[in-house]
Amino acid sequence: MNTNEILVSVVMPCLNEENTIQICIEKAKHTMEEMGVYGEVVVSDNGSSDRSVEFAESCGARVVHESIPGYGSAYLKGLGEAQGRFIVMGDSDNTYDFNELERFVTPLQEGYDMVMGNRFKGGIQPGAMPWHHQHIGNPILSGILNTFFQTGIGDAHCGMRSFTKEAFQKMHLKTRGMEFASEMVIHSAKAKLRITEVPVIYSPRPENSQAKLRSFRDGWRHLRFMLLYSPTHLFLIPGSIIMILGILIMGALAFGPVRVGNLFFGFHWMFVGCLLTLLGFQIIQLSIIARFYSLTSHFDDNIDPILKWIKDHFNLESGIILGLVVFGIGLLFDFLVLINWINGNFQSPDAIRFSIIALTLSIIGAQIIFSTFLISMLSIRRHGWGN
């Protein structure tokens, strides 16, 4: 076989699908024949104990084997073995109709990099998807993904999709579980691939076919992955809100108590403001460190505006100077506390307020200094950073 002639590779993961694997392969092969394209069907077996492999080979599919369990593991093996210029992926349980192959190939021929199926537009047949998946799980997870990564995809977890071989190589996919579906969309968006959606019908599984999806476990894996890939939403936004709230409380009480109606806010509330300010600042620090770690470890190679601004305006020395300045202001408030102590007013409300401010600024200053060293250590692996 001349692999240069293969235009379309249809890749199906398989784990004990002996009841449906044959019809899926036959549909895919028949449709490619009708389209007049030379293609292949690659079945990525993930440890089937039934006759799935035997049936797949008898239908003319090329079977590859992946011993590491997981939806992503099976696809990473199968997609890596695919030889076609265009790759179509879909489950081997007959929930997706491979007679609709052409609508996933034509947009690629027209210049798109990736084609996503949309079950909500194509139609979800009765019994194909549990109610809580259809009306709660999928809409919420797709909505979070679109909010975090601006993908504009209506059904981010549809199992039938297609892409060019070149686009697949740009995705740098790694995950082994069900979150593989989210990772593909996220990496495609970050790589600025041209993506379009087509309607696809989603059919119920045969009664004697066992679903591989575990609702809460796999839903959490998707959510966890999206949070790990978005330090802004996981760290920066919550941290900023908490820190701003803490600063507002401390600022409002810095020069004396405040009364709102029958409520009295004294220096005791400054401890709450101090706690919120320090907690928020630490979360913001984690956001910046997470971004640098993602970049230097090639977990995410995109330099976002925040990292670019830090790179352009800060280095090890400037970070140390900033930390020393903040720490020095904290020492200045400590000096004011010392003056109060010398004058016998150590337990006065002013002295306590100054002590809280000094504590807050000193800790933040020290954290800036040491986190700057940590970021510089991470940046050693990235030429031109931390200098």
Image (tube, rainbow, N blue to C red):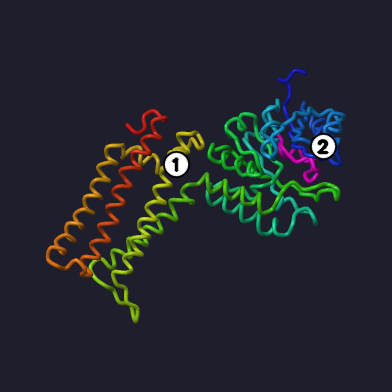
Q: Which residue is mark 2?
A: 49
Q: Is residue 338 left or right of residue 17?
A: left
Q: Residue furthest bottom?
A: 262
Count of numbered badges drawn on the protein: 2
Residue 201 in the image, given as x and y percentages of width and height: 76, 48
Compared with 22, 126 (above or below) is below
* Pick the front one: 191 or 276: 276
Q: Which residue is mark 1?
A: 291
Q: Amino acid at mark 1?
A: Arg
Residue 28 in the image, given as x and y percentages of width and height: 80, 35
Q: Residue furthest left?
A: 343
> Residue 43 appears in which quarter of the rendering?
top right
Q: Secondary structure at mark 1?
A: helix
> Residue 133 appears in which quarter of the rendering?
bottom right
The residue segment tinted magenta is 88-106
Q: Is residue 326 left or right of residue 210?
A: left
At 29% from the left and 41% from the top, the residue drawn is 319
* Pick the front one: 257 or 298: 257
Q: Secondary structure at mark 2?
A: loop
* Pick the front one: 8 or 297: 297
Instruction: Estimate how packed mark 2 is, as few (under 14), some (14 to 19) or many (20 or more) residues with alpha carbons within 10 Å.
Output: few
Q: Quadrant of the N terminus?
A: top right
